[in-house]
Image: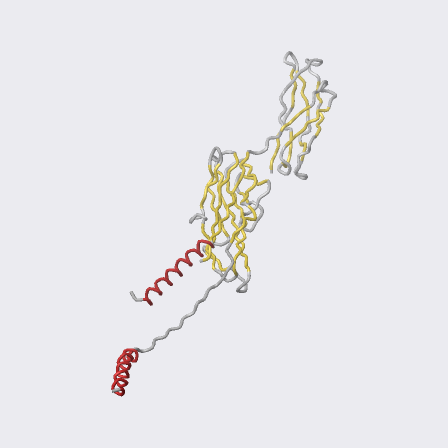
């Protein structure tokens, strides 16, 4: 009787274990990874200043994005202090930074209380993105400079003109 | 959806959320300005002292203008003083007060004037004197 009970118990156990034996073992391996980089930042070093333009007639005004002197043509004379706009982008070396905010056609308007001047910006980075050069894990910087050019016509009013330049950067 | 699929869905959602949050945190913005001042050419301001005797006095003129923009200052033509009655005095002036070599307008310069006494001698008179400031 006892043997019959043991045999029944073994059989039940075998039946119970049978589904487990029927399953195949699946295993997958993946990795967890991350890259820690410092936040990208941008700082203004200098504004885009054309200084004072003395107008005796029509002409054009140009300030290169690497120059500090204004070039004029026609009946114009440049006096005073000039500077191209200068930004410094700081972030992790090797990271790709997208630069946005400048108008798509690089055209903006400087306004005064009595009129406006159409200004075409000439940024040093025209591709919209830049890779911060340097060894991985280090801090890298990238300069962004902006010059510009505009025309002074007979209709251009005397006055002080200004316009806002905004630059946004982020990792891409 | 079994437990494994649910876990994977949660993991993907968490990764997307983390990436979105990180991208937003990595945006920086800076503003500056573009500016220019458009001005008319500087006009010379000339101030002469009071001349009590135009035959013997030296008129001291002050020509104020933007430094570095003037190539010459001259008095073309004749200068006359009329008393408004019956006579006049013709004056002469230095024709070129400043050449282009220095390129700077002096704070003050003097010109000698004198001439022939007309019928109005002894009476006060006045007349225009044109001063030409030549810019570069």
Q: Residue furthest right?
A: B56
Instruction: Give above or below for B125 relative to A118.
Output: above
The quarter of the image holding the C terminus of chain B is top right
Residue A9: image quadrant is bottom left
**Is residue A67 found left or right of B17 in the rendered image?**
right
Residue B64: image quadrant is top right
Q: Residue furthest front?
A: A1
Number of marks in the rendered image: 0
Q: Residue furthest top?
A: B85
Where in the figure is residue B69, as x and y percent of width and height? 62, 37
Where in the figure is residue A58, as x and y percent of width and height? 50, 38
Q: Which sits in the foreground, B56 or B135?
A: B135
Instruction: Give above or below for B41 relative to B58.
Output: below
Where in the figure is residue A160, as x and y percent of width and height? 53, 36
Answer yes or no: is residue B91 visible.
yes
Instruction: Give above or below for A112 relative to A90.
Output: above
Where in the figure is residue B131, as x and y percent of width and height? 63, 28
For the point 71% across and 22% down, which residue is it?
B114
Q: Which sits in the foreground, A122 or B101?
A: A122
């Amino acid at each position: 009787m006892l043997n019959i009970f043991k045999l029944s118990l073994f059989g039940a156990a075998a039946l119970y274990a049978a589904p487990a034996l029927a399953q195949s073992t699946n295993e997958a391996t993946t990795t967890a990874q991350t890259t820690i980089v410092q936040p990208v930042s941008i700082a203004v070093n200098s504004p885009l200043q054309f200084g004072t333009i003395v107008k005796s007639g029509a002409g054009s005004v140009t300030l290169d994005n690497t120059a500090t002197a204004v070039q004029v043509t026609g009946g114009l004379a440049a006096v005073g202090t000039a500077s191209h706009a200068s930004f410094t982008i700081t972030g992790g070396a090797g990271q790709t930074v997208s630069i946005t905010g400048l108008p798509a056609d690089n055209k903006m308007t400087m306004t005064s209380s009595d009129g406006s001047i159409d200004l075409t910006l000439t940024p040093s980075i025209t591709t919209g993105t830049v890779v911060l050069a340097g060894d991985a894990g280090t801090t890298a910087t990238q300069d962004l400079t902006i010059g510009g050019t505009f025309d002074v016509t007979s209709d251009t009013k005397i006055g002080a003109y200004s316009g806002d330049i905004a630059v946004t950067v982020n990792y891409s | 959806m079994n437990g494994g699929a649910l876990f994977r869905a949660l993991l993907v959602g968490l990764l997307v959320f983390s990436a979105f949050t990180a991208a937003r945190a990595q945006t920086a913005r800076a503003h500056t300005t573009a500016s220019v001042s458009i001005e008319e050419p500087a006009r010379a301001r000339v101030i002469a002292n009071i001349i009590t005797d135009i035959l013997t006095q030296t008129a001291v003129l002050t020509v104020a203008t933007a430094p570095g923009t003037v190539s010459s200052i001259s008095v073309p033509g004749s200068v006359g003083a009329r008393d408004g009655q019956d006579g006049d005095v013709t004056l002469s002036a230095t024709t070129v007060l400043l050449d282009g070599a220095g390129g700077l307008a002096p704070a003050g310069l003097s010109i000698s004037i004198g001439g022939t006494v007309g019928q109005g001698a002894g009476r006060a008179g006045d007349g225009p004197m044109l001063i030409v400031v030549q810019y570069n």
